[in-house]
Image (cartoon, grey):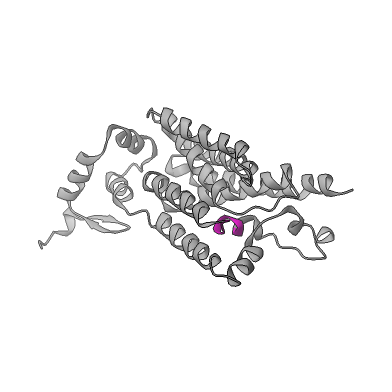
Amino acid sequence: MRTICPECQTQAPVGVICPECMDAERKKRTPAQKRAQRQWGSRSAGSVTAVRSGKPVITYALLAITSFIGLVQLIPGIGEQITSALLFAAPYLYPNLNGGFFEPWRLLTAVFVHGSFIHLALNMLALWMLGQGLEPMLGRSRYLALYLISGLGGSVMVAVIAPTTATVGASGAIFGLMAALLIIGRHIGANVRGILIVLGINFAIGFFIGGIAWQAHLGGAIIGAVVAFIYMRTRRPNQRSLQIILLAATVVLLIVVVAFIPPLILMP
């Protein structure tokens, strides 16, 4: 272990980075990562390196929470109660259609429950793979906002297109991450053909395999692309407030949509 003088220290959310470690991190970056740094990073080289070198803790936390709930769902008796308490269906938003009960939190809690172990495993694998690159690029708060708002978008699309369908799973949020990666990758000049093919294949699968809520995939992908576009247009530090306002406006728009359109479909 070596000491370091205060002048050479670079403060970071994960601790202090020395000049040698900063240079090593810079050398390990790929051309695409360097473009991402120029487009998305802070003007401060130290803070950019801190973001790039930080562990994707939000991804790990989402993996841990969702996996724990998914494993509890496998317990006979208890699992059915957990699923029933957290799944989403449009009638839960309208007391007059649901015996007086109003449970809007289900729009998001459905993201954390799954229909089977395979369903859980595939979504968690996708989350782990996507989060490794997206979270360090966007930063923790923006990444979490992207995930949750995309999941919300997926539930809203189910409510609008298939209001009598019950849905569970993180697929809407996962499709939001894929769409965001596509938008951001395209913007920084990376080769996005692979993610475009994967997104297209996964979306098409929803039409051929029964029991898959393709509406959630569509909603998550659309909202994920919208959030990524907002990030792309509000990258500068002085646009932080505008970014928050636009994200809040997106959430409000989703709430307005789900508040007015489904009742017209559900009402006799």
Query: Residue 28: x and y, percent?
Result: 22, 41
Residue farthest along the left direction in this orientation: 2
Residue drawn at point x = 73 percent, y = 53 percent: 90
Residue farthest along the bottom direction in this orientation: 77
Picture layout, residue 99 above or below residue 142? below
- Identify the image quadrant of residue 112: bottom right
Q: Which residues are magenta?
A: 109-115
Q: Is residue 110 within the magenta segment?
A: yes
Query: Residue 205: x and y, percent?
Result: 56, 37
Residue drawn at point x = 33 percent, y = 58 percent: 13
Residue farthest along the right direction in this orientation: 268
Picture layout, residue 108 above or below residue 201? below
Residue drawn at point x = 18 percent, y = 59 percent: 6
Which residue occupies the foreground of this view, 263 or 11? Answer: 263
Query: Is residue 164 shown left or right of residue 134?
Result: right
Which residue occupies the foreground of this view, 9 or 29? Answer: 29
The image quadrant where one finds the N terminus is bottom left
Which residue occupies the foreground of this view, 48 or 125? Answer: 125
Q: Is residue 267 visible?
A: yes
* Total numbered circles: 0
Query: Residue 26: x and y, percent?
Result: 22, 41
Q: Is residue 31 within the magenta segment?
A: no
Picture layout, residue 87 above or below residue 172? below
Query: Residue 266: x and y, percent?
Result: 82, 48
Query: Is residue 17 shown left or right of residue 177?
Result: left
Q: Is residue 251 visible?
A: no
Query: Is residue 159 shown left or right of residue 169?
Result: right
